Image (tube, rainbow, N blue to C red):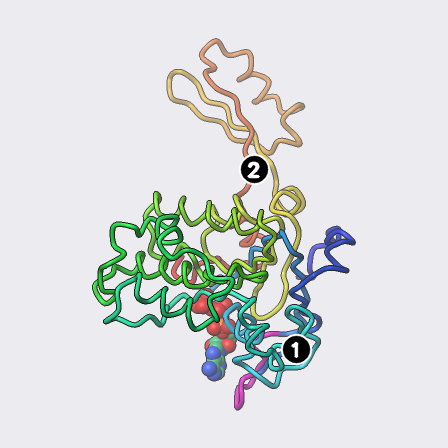
Amino acid sequence: MPPLDLPAAPAAAATTAVIVVERLHYRYPGAATAAVENLSFRVAPGEVLGFLGPSGAGKSTTQQVLTGRLRGGDGHVRVLGVAPTALRPAERARIGVSFEQPALYPKLTAREQLTFFAALGGGTRARDVDDLLGRLGLADHADQRVGTYSKGMRTRLDLARALLHRPEVLLLDEPTGGLDPASSALVRQVVADERDRGAAVLLTTHDMELATALADRVALLAQGRLAASGTPRELVLAAGERGIVLTTDDGRRLARPLHAAGSDPEVLAWLRDPALATVHTTEPTLGEVFVRLTGQSLRADA
Ligand SMILES: Nc1ncnc2c1ncn2[C@@H]1O[C@H](COP(=O)(O)OP(=O)(O)OP(=O)(O)O)[C@@H](O)[C@H]1O
């Protein structure tokens, strides 16, 4: 299915984007097919781009191209105006990266870990370590060795590490992975604060609630290609059919497409029914939009 024809990002984003990916192709050595094909997107300062797609869609590959860990792809890729493989340490310090499988030192406590990383980055732009741990709900565990942390705690600590140097670019891979709802809400707030501070955020996630709540725009990836992009609202309205649902006091329920509801005799009869209890409209979630566009679920296990 061709990409949806949606309005492009605002002109300002085109000129000031600090993450630029144009016609990226990447094929792993020896692989029969490309992991990423003809992929283009931009992220401007103060913007969150939700990067969504099922397992194997090419999200991590793209992120690794952006960090310079993967070399040899075709296309035009720039982070802070520089080709990722040419980024110097001072430029790398302006980019925060969090990982789905964080590589942290198990023998160090959270505070020791962040203090160490703060010193590694030169320290001048480093945030207050305790303040950062507090914002991510880890203040009570600051002196606990990271080897004894739960998965969700490691995820939050890795996000704290990514934020240490007030990065202008944030590449976040599943920042709510393994988190309970309260911790997810903390992370959502922290990412929103970073965006409001002016960071450009590429938010790779399977978490539809997070993407819907936080992303200014989303890019839906399927089999290495862009299936659709736009604001969550644009995608839902362009790809999804809105519906109307009526319920009655005696437990009956009627669901119909909204566009035809005004001339649907059954809907009109229900509206006159004295037992009518509720009438509301529904619209698909981003996850459902993705399934309609690609025939694939966002979760490999769904
Ligand atoms: N090191 C590798 N060598 C060869 N092929 C790889 C390698 N890493 C990933 N691939 C392949 O590239 C494609 C894209 O994988 P990628 O890990 O980028 O997907 P993803 O969207 O990040 O998935 P997930 O949500 O599971 O992290 C898949 O077909 C995958 O099998």
Q: Which mark is residue 283?
A: 2
Q: Position of residue 250 (x, y in %)?
A: 37, 17
Query: What secondary structure is the stretch in magenta mostly built from?
Result: loop
Q: Which residue is mark 1?
A: 83
Query: Was residue 33 drawn as part of the magenta stretch in this picture?
Result: yes
In which quadrant of the rendered image does the N terminus lie? Answer: bottom right
Asked if one can make out residue 227 in the rendered structure from this viewpoint, the answer is: yes
Q: Amino acid at mark 1?
A: Ala
Q: Amino acid at mark 2?
A: Glu
Cα gap from disc 2 to disc 1, whole angstroms? 41 Å
Query: Was residue 112 drawn as part of the magenta stretch in this picture?
Result: no
| Quarter of the image where one finds residue 259 | top right
Q: What residue range appears in magenta?
A: 28-36
Q: Position of residue 229 (x, y in %)?
A: 65, 55
| Quarter of the image where one finds residue 141 | bottom left
Query: Mark 2 vs mark 1: which is more N-terminal?
Result: 1
Asked if one can make out residue 58 in the rendered structure from this viewpoint, the answer is: no
State the residue in front, 111 or 298. 111
Q: Tell me the crowding category of disc 1: few under 14, some 14 to 19, or many 20 or more residues within 10 angstroms, Cα based.
A: some
Rendered view: 286 above or below 43: above
Secondary structure beneath label 2: loop
